[in-house]
Image: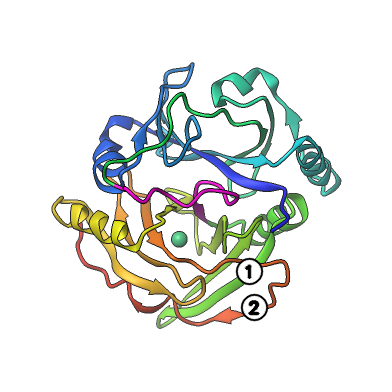
Amino acid sequence: MDHQLELAYLVVEVPEPESLTPVFGDVVGLVAGEPTPAGASTWRDDDRVHRLILQSGAANDAVAIGFEATDPSAFDATVTRLQASGFDVAEVDADAAERRVDRLARTKSPWGTNVEIVLGLAAAASPFSSPLVPGGFLTDGVGFGHAVFATTAFDASVEFLTAGLGFNQSDWLEMELAPGIDLEVRFFHCNARHHTVALARAPFDLPQVLHHVMFEMNERDDVGDAFDRLWSTELGIPNGLGRHDNDGMFSFYLQTPAGFQVEVGHGARVVTDDWDDNRRYDAISAWGHQPLRQA
Ligand SMILES: [Fe+2]
């Protein structure tokens, strides 16, 4: 699919980044990357130098999300589109080294997370190989995964993603979770991945805007093995194995000690140039995804 952006990295700030090693290293099977120049720890799910950046601090939330432009003209077009849509965006080359990119432009999303448009995310010094995930992760042409944010600034966030960043809506979910409690989630793509960002309408400000980050494995059995590793821990399991109704992803969710969740999945639908299935769903899952274990 012809596209301009891929999910480059997610920056999460937590008081104790090492507290997440059992999650990302031991359960999900990511591979530790080199620390950044400023000393943040990093994780990889492919040949890039880092995909998840864990910096030490009080925010306890995602603080930045990076989108990699596929070439210099895509970088310029994205910056121009943001400016034309009324969003302040500034090229901050001084921060490019910390993110291991050639160019970096930064704006702030309405949901509160910094958004960084980058060019040239560096390759890692070594090829990717995870002993726990022999089939590897699906990232080629689609970026490292997806992220879901919950926000009270829902309509402004949709406008930012579509008019500003040029994402397109794949479909949406609207359902009554419980009597009087409605759920609305909109799913947006910027390449063939069904959604790179999804937005949930929050009824009030939540302690974290990051609901979850997702890593997609190439092999279904690798998801099963990861679930077995999770089962042998004490980590919370907000959703056991199941299959989403809209993107068709076979996945499970774990709860990190920091609060936000991680989805591990396989086999999601792929968006094509002639995508014409932008419609409402009224169920999160076709089957499964039962709440299994409180932390
Ligand atoms: Fe997800």
Q: CA distance from mark 1 to mark 2?
A: 7 Å
Quarter occupied by residue 251: bottom left
Residue 16 appears anywhere in the view? no
Q: Where does residue 66 sit, x and y in percent of width and height?
A: 59, 39
Q: Nearer the viewer, residue 130 or 59?
A: 130
In the displayed structure image, the side of residue 225 where residue 248 appears, left or right: right
In the displayed structure image, the side of residue 245 where residue 84 appears, left or right: right
Magenta span covers which residues?
Answer: 133-149
Which residue carries the number 1 mark? 170
Q: Where does residue 126 sit, x and y in percent of width and height?
A: 43, 27
Q: Quadrant of the N terminus?
A: bottom right
Magenta segment, principal secondary structure?
loop
Q: Where does residue 207 sit, x and y in percent of width and height?
A: 42, 49
Please give the name of the residue rendered at 73% of the width and 55% of the height, measured from the top-left corner.
2
Whichever of labels 1 and 2 marks the residue nearer the N terminus, that label is: 1
Q: Quadrant of the C terminus?
A: bottom left
Q: Is the residue marked by circle 1 packed among few (<14), some (14-19), or many (20+) residues within 10 Å?
A: many
Residue 20 appears anywhere in the view? yes
Classify mark 2 as within 8 Å of ligand 1 or not, answering yes or no.
Answer: no
Quarter occupied by residue 103: top right
Q: Mark 1 is on which residue type?
A: Ser
Q: Secondary structure at mark 2?
A: loop
- Relative to 230, say whether 249 is above or below: below
The circle on residue 277 is 2
Q: Mark 2 is on which residue type?
A: Asp
State if disc 2 and disc 1 touch (CB < 8 Å): yes
Q: Where does residue 266 sit, x and y in percent of width and height?
A: 40, 62
